Image: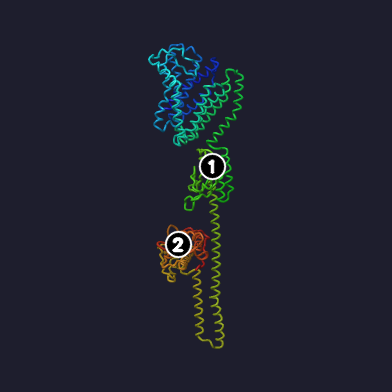
Amino acid sequence: MERRWVCLATLGPIGVAALVYIVVARGFVEGQADHTLAWPMLGVLPMFVFGIWLLTVSASRTAVLVALAATAMLVSAAYETLMLQNPQLAAQPWFPLVNGIGLTADGTATAAFLMVFATFPDGVVEHRWQRIAVVFLWLPLLAAPLTLLTTPHVVMSPYIGISGDAVPNPYAVPWLEWAAPAVHYLVVQSWVAVAIGLTVLGTRALFGAPEVRARTRVMALVVAGAMVAFALWTFFDNWFVQVLVYASLIAIPIAAIHGILSYGAFDIAPGDRGRLVARSSNLLITVIYAAAVATPALLLAPPLRAVPAILITTLLAVALLPVRTWLQRRLHRRLFGDRERQLEMLGELGARLEQAVEPRELLTRLAEAVREGLDASWVRIGLVAADGDLAPMPSEVAGASAGAAAADEAAADACDLVHGDELLGRIEVGPRRRGEYGEAERMLLRTVAGQAAAAVANVRLAAQLAEQLDELTASRERLIAVQDDERRRLERDLHDGIQQDVVAQIAGLRLARNRLQRGELTSAELEELQEQARATLTDLRELARGIHPPVLSDNGLAAAVESGVARFPIPLTVEADDRVRGERFSDDVETTAYYVVREALANTAKHANATHASVGLARDDGRLRIAIADDGCGIDAEQAAAARASGHGANGVPVSHGGLANIRDRVAALRGTMRVSANEPSGTIVTVELPVDGVAAGTTSEGVAVG
């Protein structure tokens, strides 16, 4: 069984029995008129309640010492009550032995409290001389045996108010009587132990390491105040000084609670601090409330009759009830934040997020809501970039320290924005403006992140759809522009070339008819007209080949691409796997793939300064893969990104109507993909993938030449 449970099972019943005896003896049995319940109820009871509670949550040695000291104080008060109610016990021959109970209780309380103060908060001191010094804090425990051996009369506690000088001590050893004065002042009065304990605590609080000073400062101030109050009580025994004494005793558990919350006094784990401090503080507030209500009646009990005492107590109970409620509310707000404000923030967050129509506005509203709800000094929200990593700079920052937050100030806490299995971003919060983040604030942050993730995903999706719609609109506008340009080119070619040839041929035929009527027509003239008609037919075939080459319809994609090898101005190789050569694809796919190759090769011939180019055709996993590579001047990553985004070529040449943009638009019409990258060791490679299984109906590509 743990030590604390043994101590709890022992000290708890002893303390409760002593308290019950005190209350019954002093409150219901007529006794001394000048002793009331003020000391046990106002001075000892709060400490006892805190000490016993502390044993239920901590197994540290310091917690055991607090409970031991408070129990010893109750036992001492019970012995004092016993002697006040039964002074005739002093005449009994065994009284010197029984008196040792009171001296031992006083010594135990003094020694245990001094150990708690000197070694606060975890029962450990830092220096060797301090470890040696705290051993002497147990000197008060020797008061009973030493006085029994050295003093010829009974030595009684000065707090009882009864002198034992007239009561002989038959157990005294005559040859040890010379030590009686030293025992009285050094052990019974505990001056040595008190001086040592205060010295150790003072040196730790004033001259210790910064961490030690921070952990002992509050307790040192409380102990100093208690010593001043007790010193005043020695010389001025009035109700005002008594209130100071009782307040100083109540301040000791308050300082201990502060130690639990701030730095884990009594070896309490960080995750339990807020919860345990809330429980102990509520318990202590209840005890303080009861003590405050009972104080006037307890302090004024001898001259005050029952009815006025009850009336005063009732009025104080009603008057102090709002104060108790306010204290509890302030405590919970300090520990767990303003729950009402946080719940209100959660209720308003949904409306705020629904009103946001674009990502920047959404993140602004979210950051402000989190900062207000958690009372954070700043909040920053970062979204995941296209590469899947968090953006190096926050997407939104809120708070007075926004500049510092954006400059990579360390976050006090953070929570990811996750929608489904997708990481969307992260919310980071700076230190709280008041206090620290507890489990309630972390839970609220997770709740807000879960609620906001869906909204962020929706707005992000809407923005992506809007961007895709804009791109689709721009793509269709470019296709229309290309088609218009192509129609105008065809019109020029027909008007300026073939049409003029046909007009010339018509004129030649009219002239031949006239000469035939006159008998002047020769066979040479007919042969010339025939050659002109043959040339016109050739031009028509070339024009038709530019619109849709017959070899593409007759022999397929690989043959159509290979047919232009001889006419390409630089060496060109075409590699096609057996699946591409043995399979015919839909007209849309073959036409798009053919013009993608032509467009890419045209860019290579115009801009790349290449000495060799290649075309690769492969069929794999439901997609047709086309790779056009060259060994030219190349393209870096930044240029490739710009080419994908704006349709610029490797040398920055705009290609909005005849280059990569046109390729991208054609590929996008079939829901394919295009990637432009550097070719090792030099040059550029354009990779296009087109779906060849289940291409949606109506996604036809315009079969127009783009040479």
Q: Name the residue under label 1.
A: 376
- Can you tell which quarter of the image residue 135 is in? top left
Q: Which x, y percent locates residue 641?
A: 48, 59
- Can you tell which quarter of the image residue 290 is in? top right
Give the mark nearer the N terminus: 2 vs 1. 1
The front one of 336 and 583 is 336
Q: Which x, y percent locates residue 429?
A: 51, 44
Q: Which x, y percent locates residue 683?
A: 43, 63
Compared to residue 673, the image places residue 289 above or below, namely: above
> Alpha carbon of mark 2 to alpha carbon of mark 1: how far?
47 Å
Numbered disc in front, either 2 or 1: 1
The front one of 563 and 247 is 247
Residue situated furthest bottom in the rendering: 519
Tag 2, which secondary structure? loop
Q: Can residue 500 be seen in this view?
A: yes
Q: Can residue 266 be seen in this view?
A: no
Crowding at dot 2, Cα within 10 Å, few <14 / some 14-19 / many 20+, comes out as many
Tag 1, which secondary structure? loop
The front one of 505 and 596 is 596
Type of amino acid under label 2: Ile
Q: Mark 2 points at which residue?
A: 635
Q: Which x, y percent locates residue 226?
A: 51, 27
- Please identify the quadrant where the N terminus is shown: top left
- Can you tell which quarter of the image residue 9 is in? top left
Type of amino acid under label 1: Ala
Q: How many labels does the image show?
A: 2
Compared to residue 209, the image places residue 20 above or below, namely: above
Mark sitting on residue 39: none
